[in-house]
Each structure stands twice: as C-alpha cells, then as structure tokens.
Amino acid sequence: MQFTLSSGTLNARLQTLVRVIGGKNAISILDCFLFEVANNTLTVTASDAENVMQATIELDECTGEGRFALPNHTILNAVKELPEQPLQMTIDDQSLSVVVDYQNGSFGLAALAADDYPVMPDMSDDATVLTLNQQLLAENISRSLFATAQDEIRPVMGGILFDLKTDGLTVVATDGHKLVRNRILNVVAEEEPTSFILPQKPAQLLKGVLAKGEGDVVVRFAANSCEFKYDGGEFRCRLIEGRYPNYNSVIPTNNTNCLTADRKTMLGALKRVLPFSSESSRLVRFHLEKGLLRLQASDIDFATSAKESIACEYNGTTMDIGFKGDSVCEILNNLSSDEVTVQLADPSRAGVFVPVEQPENQEILMLMMPMLLND
C-alpha cells in the first residue's frame, strides 16, 4: 500500500488528535494512532477507550487500502519539524514496515496490526439528533467550562449539561458557587425534552476542534454516549450518567438593585485590587452607591490593602457585597459585550451577571454566590 499526502495537513491533524490519547493507557495500542486508507481517503483515529476522535484527509495519490497503527510519539516527532511538502508513505502489508519519503530524505518505522485497536459500539437507533453551527457550539462550551467542578462525590457537576426542550437548548455548568446558563433559542426539541451531560475532557477537545472550522456539527446522543460529526472528522465519547441539579431554582428573580458598568473597566480594576486580597479567600468587597462602584480588598495577615472606584450606573439601595475576585474575573472574561449588568437582591443572595447586548438568538446569564463580609 502506498499513498501521498501533505506533511502540514498530517501534522495538523495529528497535533489535534494526540490530545485525546491518555497519559497511562491500560491497552498499549491506545498509545498509537490508527491509520485507515480507503476510497482515496486517510482516516486517522485516536482514543483513550472512553473518547474517540477521527480526522479525515483526502489523499493526493493512493494505491491499495488497509489499516495499521503507529506509535504517536514516533510519528509526531518525525513530521512536526518538516516544512510543507508532499510525503509518500509506503506500507508493507506483510511485515508492517513503514517508509516515509520526503523531499530530502526518508525515515522508516514499524507499524502494529490494527486488529487489536478497540472500536466503540455504534450509536443506538433511538439516538436524539440535533444540528448546530459549530462556531456557536464551540463558543457555548468555551463560555461554560470554567464553571464546571472537580467533584468526585457529585460527578454530574464535573460536566456541561445540554438541556434540550421545546423552548430552546440550554447549556449549563455549575460548581455550586458559580453558574453559567446559555440559552440557544432557535434550537428546540422536536419531540420529548431530553438532555445529556458532557464530561470536561470531551468538552475541552471539542472546543479546540470546532473553533477552527466552519459549517454545522451534527450531534447524536443516547443514554450513555454521544457523537459529533463535523467537516473533516468526528468525535465519540461516553457521557456522565446521573441527574443534574435544578439550575433554574438557584437563580434569583426579584433583583431590585441593578448595576451597569463597562466590562473591561470593571475587569481591569478587579485585577489591580485582587493581588491585595487574602490568598485563602480571594475576597473582594463591592460597595455600590448611586453612580459609583468601589472595589476593596485586604489581607490582614500581611497588612496589605487596595481600593479602586469606577463610574457606573446603579439603581438601588447602597450596598456592600462580597465576591470571590478570581471567579468574578472569570465571569467577566467569558462575557463579550462592552457593558455588563449585575442584578442583586441583597448581600446574602447570588449576583446575576448578564451582558447588556445578548448575541443573536441567545440568552447568556452567569451567577456568582456571595461571600460573607467581616465588617
């Protein structure tokens, strides 16, 4: 078997796929990429037994068809330093020796038989199917990831919930202290409402892959697995099983105090004040009064303190409320509008952060639980 392809294309695909491969695999062949050649197309697969990603490459020339596996470090190190040029790969089907010829040289390596490479079972026939713009999906995953938890006791909190109902698709993440709720209004359930919980690793992998492409991604999901098909590849993963908490119940609705400020100005002030807060709590005091937001932080143990005031629009009673500064910075970093509104009921209830300008056909809301202030 012999085929020719672009060195740059192969390297780009392998660099993406290698993120799937785990550091310690129980099955040694999972340290390899699976190469499959058929119909003038090369399909490269990477897996860690729970997640499987495939990338396809149209071949310039191809003679024969077949399957073989190559150790990921060997082939990656071999092609990553090559400038853009054609690569010709020749595989001996009997001995599984591989010779790669390029412009000024060649290298040889030994392949492994592909028969032992595990394959995930096909999706069930009753899988739910939905189609999303892949940039939109990448943005919603990216916006939500920071709010997921590292919680072995409650594994569902370590994933992103995709809640499909007749009024839209809601993408949710929470760790119990902060929450992100994205609503995509023009993606609705055609039949019964359904949902799935995407783990963190698949979410990270998808965010990187989908952000680079255009077009749509077709999502098929069933009880414990999910499949994403997009231009140039596909991704399969296991889902987190369990019941996600009622995220709407923790969002306060009667918020009579409303602050509107420039997002970047607030973020800059927070970053300047935050280094003076306690290392253990990262507490920042928000003092709100008409036309003014004052941020204060201090660390009694090291006798450090800082405060900064910024102009804002504020309709409500004079109030002091505490938030974890790191988390508020994450929220502001993951909102894209020029201005942000913070809706508050009282210092003991969560603050609701929403962009002043919502993206088309979307509603974005982020929530932050307050911290106790020592007056």
Image: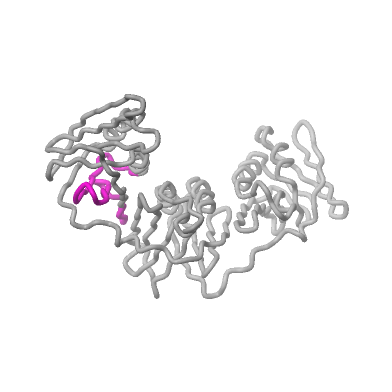
Asked which quadrant contains residue 335, the reply is top left
Residue 349 is a magenta residue: yes
Classify 259 as above or below 248. Answer: above
Residue 360 is a magenta residue: yes
Total numbered circles: 0
Asked which quadrant contains residue 321, the reply is top left
Residue 261 at what x, y percent from top left?
Answer: 22, 38
- Residues rendered magenta in the picture: 335-364
- Is 195 or 257 nearer to us in this picture? 257
Classify 318 as above or below 272. Answer: below
Query: At x 71% / y 56%, what residue is drawn?
Result: 36
Name the residue furthest right. 95
Name the residue furthest front. 301
Classify 38 as above or below 59. Answer: below
Residue 84 at what x, y percent from top left?
Answer: 65, 35
Residue 135 appears anywhere in the view: no
By what rule are the colours in the image chosen?
A: one colour
Asked whether, in this view, residue 97 is left or right of residue 356, the answer is: right
Asked whether, in this view, residue 356 is left or right of residue 26, the answer is: left
Residue 115 at what x, y percent from top left?
Answer: 77, 61
Query: At x 53% / y 63%, what residue is drawn?
Result: 226
Query: At x 47% / y 61%, what residue is drawn?
Result: 197
Instruction: Identify the image quadrant of the C terminus.
Output: top left
- Is 326 or 18 nearer to us in this picture? 326
Residue 5 appears anywhere in the view: yes
Asked whether, in this view, residue 237 is left or right of residue 368, the answer is: right
Residue 118 at what x, y percent from top left?
Answer: 70, 61
